[in-house]
Image: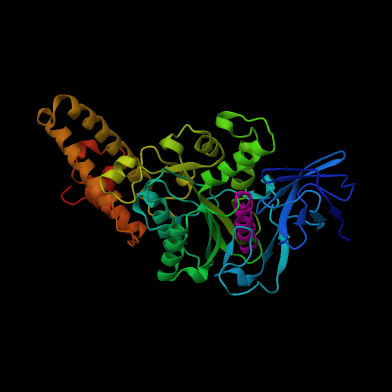
Amino acid sequence: MPQSEYVGISQVTGPFILLEDAGSDAFFGELVDVRVPGGVTRRGRIVSLSEGATLVQVFSGTDGLIPNDTRVRLLGRTLQVQLAPSIIGRTFNGLGEPADGCGPVFGGRRADANGMPLNPMARQYPKDFIHTGISSIDTLTTLIRGQKLPIFSGNGLPHNQLAVQIATQARLMGSENFAVVFAGIGIKHDDAEFLMRELSEKGRTNNVVTYLNLADDPVIERIATPRMALSAAEYMAYELGLHVLVIITDMTSYCEAVRELGVAAGEVPSRKGYPAYLYSDLASLYERAGVVRGLNGSVTQLPILTMPNDDITHPIPDLTGFITEGQIVLSRDLDGKGIYPPIDVLTSLSRLMKDGIGKGFTRDDHPNLASQLFASYSHVQDVRSLAGVVGEDELSKTDKQSLAFGGLFENKFLKQGKDEDREIGQSLDMAWDILSSLPKGDLTRVSLDEIKAHIKNQ
């Protein structure tokens, strides 16, 4: 297809340029090259079309563009990602360009980074347990193959450390065909260095594809980064037959970029200034996870977002919760106690775990044990509230045992080393040991046979 080139633009506004009289050659999402004589060529894409006018987003900004001298060339294609088996183990920037000094990706093919939505009728119900090595996740908020399970965090909480630990420890039980796609959106240089160093030191880089958009990269690149990562994951899953876990951090940076570009384009804002289409935009990313009937691979998503002011009702976590199948919530109070990972199990939820645990997946006693842990730890919060009013000395013996259980649960079960990889059997046995500190009559969610089998002296 011949490339059309236009000289002169009518307007520059923020990251946008307005091109008049582009004719019928242009189409929505088309990539363009923007340059001035003697300057570096910049990449952009068409984001709006109307009769006689075309709006273009410029990826690297519009500083230094001179309207009369600026040349715009239509490239006749959309934003694409290079796909080949050799991308595994490589690091790319937010636009899918090699960033590891190993040269271009040879072979394979180029594909539209926007991907295609999965046919709902072709989806298979997710039900296979993914091991993360984190007791609180594996036991109480189990990650299932094909699920989208976000992590709700806050500024200063160790979500990056948790992301790396999951990336290096995660595996699908009974399968060796497992890989990780790691996408960083708007992350700081020191965080990027930490992520790459940890992945390298733990020997997982050969099984990880990394896309990094840094904090000082152009904002518009943040729109492309998760799409690049998900397109790579879909290729690895549905063409190479791998089970792929996609970890994306931080979705808040992505949503902030969507809001900033929406304001610059003059769109009418909705809640807290975010565009009204934020829900459908997020859904277009999250819904790219799943298991497709008849294909060997799968895509599982673990997006991470930082809640502004720790507000779980903020539009970003609120809309995310509507689309995804649960959430893992990090607690600032637990983090203040020195507990890592600081997962608040009472506000966390995995809606698909009931079909991926128990007989044939983890262990027969897992469902009842998880229910008992939730019930017992929930009662701990009630007792702590009561102790705050009447004092701990005035509590009954049973309530004091409940407080002791709460301390064991947090400091022994929830808390674990940053390099500690616990098998699911080890986590379940540890949970039974902690429950043994409670009176037998309080264990109402487990059967008598389970108590006899797993608790000594019963």
* Horizontal side of residue 458 vs 154, given as left or right: left
Look at the image and give the residue range highlighted in magenta. Answer: 219-236
Report if residue 372 lies within the magenta region: no
Q: How has the structure been colored for display?
A: rainbow
* Horizontal side of residue 70 vs 392, given as left or right: right
Q: Nearer the viewer, residue 413 or 197?
A: 197
Residue at point 80% right, 47% down? 9
Residue situated furthest left in the rendering: 393
Residue 143 in the image: state x and y as whole percent: 46, 51
* Above or below: residue 147 compared with residue 391: below
When asked about the image quadrant of residue 202, the answer is bottom left
Residue 77 in the image: state x and y as whole percent: 79, 57
Report if residue 230 lies within the magenta region: yes
Q: Which image quarter is the N terminus in? A: bottom right
Instruction: Using the rendered image of the protein, determine whether residue 362 is visible from the camera's viewpoint.
Output: no
* Above or below: residue 408 compared with residue 102: above
* Horizontal side of residue 376 vs 91, given as left or right: left
Residue 133 in the image: state x and y as whole percent: 38, 58
* Above or below: residue 357 compared with residue 180: above
Instruction: Using the rendered image of the protein, determine whether residue 314 is visible from the camera's viewpoint.
Output: yes
Residue at point 26% right, 53% down? 430
When asked about the image quadrant of residue 216, the answer is bottom right
Q: Nearer the viewer, residue 241 or 451?
A: 241
**SS assignment for the magenta stretch, majority:** helix
* Horizontal side of residue 379 vs 87, given as left or right: left
